[in-house]
Image: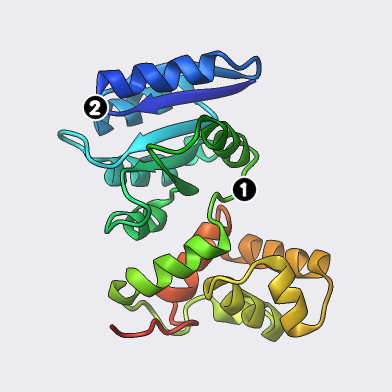
Amino acid sequence: MIRVLLADDQALMRAGFRALLDAEDDLEVVGEAADGAAAVELSQRLRPDVVLMDVQMPGLDGIEATRRIATDPLLSAVRVLILTNYEVDSYVFDALRAGASGFLLKDADPADLLQAVAVVARGEALLAPSVTRTLISEFVTGAPPGDLTAGREVLTAREQEIVELVARGLGNDEIAERVVISPATAKTHINRAMMKLHCRDRAQLVVWAYDSGLVAPRRR
């Protein structure tokens, strides 16, 4: 059973998500929050598997709520799925940097929402390569530079090469073809890099690549 917390300031939106999720045998809505502060408090109390988090809420917004959940050691198993009204908006990269495992359009098909919850609950990132490329081209250019060598020493040369390709939006099959390895080997390198860098998922690996300076964003 996947336990889900809904965080959205619109009661009608929460009701719609609850009706959809509760209709599934393997999903259970364990709570609802109308603002970010309540989302954090309920996450601490209920320990859901997934939080469906709206960005724009009164008081504490969804990005700061996501950051507080992601940085709480007691909530390391809680995954945040950001809900947004636009395919890519100015909040998405900030949300990923804060610790979100991915994002989903509010008007997505019901089947896509159910799949997204399942993917994030498994500890995977809901960040398709095409979405990664769009994020990079639109918003990563505005990311503040970090320590240009931070963390690189823990990665092998091959791992750095593959992390760079992940950050540029390539999927496992594309990476495998580019560096002439199998997709399974590419996935192994990615998993090892995430473990060494303490990244929760692939989305966080993309954030690290830009924040560390491993990949230089294109300037608009």
Q: Mark 1 highlights which residue? A: 124
Q: Nearer the viewer, residue 3 or 85?
A: 85
Q: CA distance from mark 2 to mark 1?
A: 27 Å
Q: Quadrant of the C terminus?
A: bottom left
Quick check: can you spot residue 6? yes
Q: Nearer the viewer, residue 100 or 41?
A: 100
Residue at image location 39% in from the left, 74% down from the top: 137
Q: Hey, which quadrant is residue 175 in on the image?
A: bottom right
Disc 1 secondary structure class: loop
- Looking at the rendered structure, the kind of residue marked 2 is Asp
Quick check: can you spot residue 72? no
Badge 2, how many Cα within 10 Å: few under 14, some, many 20+? Answer: some
Q: Mark 2 highlights which residue? A: 9
Residue at image location 56% in from the left, 64% down from the top: 129
Q: Is residue 62 left or right of residue 167?
A: left
Residue at image location 47% in from the left, 84% down from the top: 149
Q: How far from the left and from the top, in percent, is residue 75?
A: 48, 36
Q: How far from the left and from the top, in percent, is residue 114?
A: 56, 31
Disc 2 secondary structure class: loop
- Looking at the rendered structure, the kind of residue marked 1 is Glu
> Which mark, residue 75?
none
The answer to whether residue 12 is above or below residue 116 is above
The answer to whether residue 155 is above or below residue 77 is below
Q: How far from the left and from the top, in percent, is residue 110?
A: 51, 30
Badge 1, how many Cα within 10 Å: few under 14, some, many 20+? Answer: some
**Farthest residue toward the left?**
59
Is the image coloured rainbow, by chain, by secondary structure, or in one colour? rainbow
